[in-house]
Image: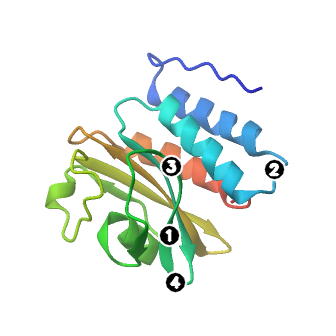
């Protein structure tokens, strides 16, 4: 049984350090990608305040396919280059979106989402998945969130 303590009053860099440490411990030695994504999606949901969706889209046959997540039911398939997730997959770059309604081509899986952070997970330079975080609050995510999730993506690159 894993139990992780969360200090919601801690500075973001400490919160993300703990999140990455917990994800590392939880996925270390486990070879099943789905199990690892499921546990990490749950950790994100538990650790991060003010989110309404945390999870993964996996690259399958040239498109993003829904992976393990926490939150409302979501879009199953997203074309590379479409929406925030597809843009992250196409560019290989983190997408930090303060207002999803201002993002050209945003795909509204949950009408309550107002801001979004999507970080590509890369293995050998190829995008294999994206980590997707949504919030019902505008401007919820910042550079510290992006850096924290990018560190998480590095740990997960060979575990999903």
* Residue 60 location, quadrant: bottom right
Q: For mark 3, what is the residue?
A: 69
Circle 3 crowding by C-alpha within 10 Å: few under 14, some 14–19, many from 20: many
State the CA–CA distance, disc 1 to disc 3: 12 Å
Q: For mark 1, what is the residue?
A: 65
**From what the image shows, is residue 26 above or below residue 94?**
above
| 50 and 77: which is toward the camera | 77
**From what the image shows, is residue 100 above or below residue 137?**
below
Q: Residue furthest right?
A: 29
Circle 4 crowding by C-alpha within 10 Å: few under 14, some 14–19, many from 20: few
Mark 2 or mark 1, which is nearer to you? 1
Among numbered discs 4 and 2, the one appearing first in the sequence: 2
Residue at 45% over, 32% down:
48
- The picture places residue 109, in percent across and down from the top left corner, at 30, 58
Among numbered discs 2 and 1, the one appearing first in the sequence: 2
Among numbered discs 3 and 2, the one appearing first in the sequence: 2
Q: Residue furthest bottom?
A: 61
- The picture places residue 73, in percent across and down from the top left corner, at 39, 52
Residue 66 left/right relative to 125: left
Residue at 42% over, 40% down:
144
**Mark 4–mark 3 contact, CB under 8 Å?**
no
Secondary structure of the residue carrying tag 1 is strand
**Mark 3–mark 2 contact, CB under 8 Å?**
no
Q: For mark 2, what is the residue?
A: 30
Residue 61 left/right relative to 139: right
Q: For mark 4, what is the residue?
A: 62
């Amino acid at each position: 049984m894993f139990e992780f303590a969360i200090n919601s009053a801690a500075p973001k860099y400490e919160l993300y350090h703990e999140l990455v440490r917990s994800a590392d411990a939880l996925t270390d030695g486990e070879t099943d990608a789905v199990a690892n994504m499921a546990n990490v999606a749950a950790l994100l949901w538990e650790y991060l305040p003010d989110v309404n969706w945390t999870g993964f889209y996996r690259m399958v046959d040239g498109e993003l396919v829904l992976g393990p997540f926490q939150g409302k039911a979501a879009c199953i398939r997203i074309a590379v280059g479409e929406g925030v997730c597809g843009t992250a997959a196409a560019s290989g770059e983190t997408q930090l979106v303060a207002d999803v309604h201002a993002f050209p081509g945003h795909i509204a899986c949950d009408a309550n989402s107002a801001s979004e952070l999507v970080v590509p997970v890369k293995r050998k330079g190829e995008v294999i998945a994206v980590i997707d975080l949504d919030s019902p609050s505008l401007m919820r995510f910042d550079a510290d969130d992006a850096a924290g999730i990018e560190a998480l993506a590095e740990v997960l690159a060979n575990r999903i």
